[in-house]
DNA sequence: AATGGACTCAACCGCTCTTAC
DNA sequence: GGTAAGAGCGGTTGAGTCCAT
């Protein structure tokens, strides 16, 4: 009944691999291939679990692996694919020859997440943080909206402090809203990638509640309007022209841009072009493209009868598709 | 030079799905 | 059909290294 155990757990070595172990494993696999990981450590003379051997081979020893730094185009691909499939590292790795899921996961967690956060973009939703504010604004009464900026500033201060002090902050806990676009993606085999949304909306709701609470507090502290408020007018603009949320977002970071028309576009200084976002709609120049339209359609479908659309004129239509995934990237996934 | 915090990344853990028995 | 190991995957850990003070 069942299979025999892959190894005797008491008799296996763990931890870092030595060059001798690497040589033994590589030599054995070169000669016999990678069939039956259970037998490989035994036959190769290694005191390792078969699973450990498999990981060592697939993540490090395979001759077709790249070990150097990630190129800019590789980073673009990772971010773009992540915006579509989320933390499905094996799917992303499949689009990057020579890179393993572990490599990509590590690179994302140590570098790319911080880069995006530094640009004012939530690495989970791939939307500007300011879009969250715009979404909240749609649910607030006008007197509360006047205090939104102040309240949100308080709630985002941890992120700002992180950027300034490089202290670790778990962004995912505070910004776990998921782009509506995720739901529409099909994975190999035709399964929708919608499981990625499971459990994430709670975190975003928590953030929204947090900001709303701050709004209430701010209103209690200010019987009269703030000295410098940005009351949003009926057309979505503030009295001094501030358009809702993010005309200043995200900040430009040298050599790292993020944007809709970026991938493979000629004439762009960098593939990291950022979309110009007003906090309500994108003006990044690709609003007519199919993907963006799809994104807006998806958003409309999920706005629960227009919850996200503040007015008929749509000043606070909150979707802003940041990535224009090229067909050659999307096709293998869809 | 010493120290402590931040960062990186290989390796492990634990879960799910598949497959052999 | 039930059981348990194999395989694959994403999340987490911790040793080593870097860097600022």
Image (cartoon, coloured by chain):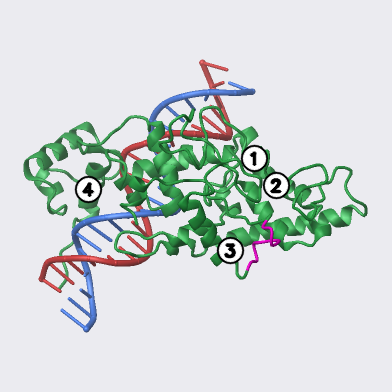
Chain colours: A green, B red, C blue
Q: Earlier in the sequence, mark 3 or mark 4?
A: 4
Q: Earlier in the sequence, mark 4 or mark 1?
A: 4
Marks 2 and 4 in Cβ contact (< 8 Å): no
Residue drawn at x 71%, y 60% is: A138
Residue drawn at x 21%, y 46% is: A53
Q: Where does label 1 land, which residue?
A: A249
Numbered badge on residue A54:
4
Density class for disc 3 (Cα within 10 Å; few <14, some 14-19, many ≥20) is few
Query: What's the distance in space between the residues labelled 2 and 3, CA to CA?
Result: 23 Å
Using the rendered view, name the quadrant where residue A194 is placed: bottom left
Query: What's the distance in space between the residues labelled 2 and 4, CA to CA?
Result: 49 Å
Q: Where does label 2 land, which residue?
A: A245
Tell which of A101 and C2 is nearer to you: A101
Picture coordinates of residue A182 (x, y %)? 46, 58
Q: Chain of mark 2?
A: A
Q: Chain of mark 3?
A: A
Q: Earlier in the sequence, mark 2 or mark 4?
A: 4
Q: Where does label 3 land, which residue?
A: A202
* Left or right: A228 as drawn, with respect to A317: right
């Amino acid at each position: 009944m069942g299979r025999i155990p892959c190894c005797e757990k008491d008799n296996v070595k763990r931890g870092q691999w030595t060059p001798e172990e690497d040589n033994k494993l590589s030599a054995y696999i070169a000669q016999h291939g990678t069939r039956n990981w259970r037998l490989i450590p035994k036959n190769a003379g290694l005191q390792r679990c078969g699973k450990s051997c498999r990981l060592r081979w697939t993540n490090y020893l395979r001759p077709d692996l790249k070990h150097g730094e990630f190129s800019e185009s590789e980073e673009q691909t990772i971010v773009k694919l992540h915006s579509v499939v989320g933390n499905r590292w094996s799917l992303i790795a499949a689009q990057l020859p020579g890179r393993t899921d572990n490599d990509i996961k590590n690179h994302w967690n140590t570098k790319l997440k911080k880069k995006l956060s530094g640009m004012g973009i939530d690495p989970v939703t791939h939307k500007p943080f300011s879009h969250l504010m715009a979404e909240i604004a749609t649910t607030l009464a006008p007197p509360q909206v006047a205090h939104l900026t102040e309240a949100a500033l308080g709630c985002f201060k941890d992120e700002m402090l992180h950027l300034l002090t490089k202290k670790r902050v778990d962004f995912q806990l505070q910004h776990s809203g998921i782009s509506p676009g995720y739901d529409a993606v099909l994975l190999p085999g035709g399964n929708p990638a919608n499981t990625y949304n499971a459990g994430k909306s709670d975190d975003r709701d928590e953030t929204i509640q947090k900001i709303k609470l701050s709004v209430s507090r701010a209103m209690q502290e200010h019987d009269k309007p703030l000295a410098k408020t940005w009351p949003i007018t009926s057309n979505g603009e503030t009295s001094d022209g501030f358009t809702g949320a993010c005309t200043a977002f995200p900040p430009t970071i040298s050599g790292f841009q993020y944007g809709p028309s970026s991938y493979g576009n000629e004439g762009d200084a960098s593939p990291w072009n950022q979309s110009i976002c007003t906090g309500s709609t994108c003006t990044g120049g690709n609003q007519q493209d199919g993907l963006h339209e799809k994104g807006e359609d998806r958003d409309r479908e999920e706005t629960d009868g227009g919850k996200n659309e503040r007015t008929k004129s749509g000043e606070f239509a909150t979707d802003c598709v940041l990535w224009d995934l090229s067909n050659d990237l999307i096709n293998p996934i869809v």
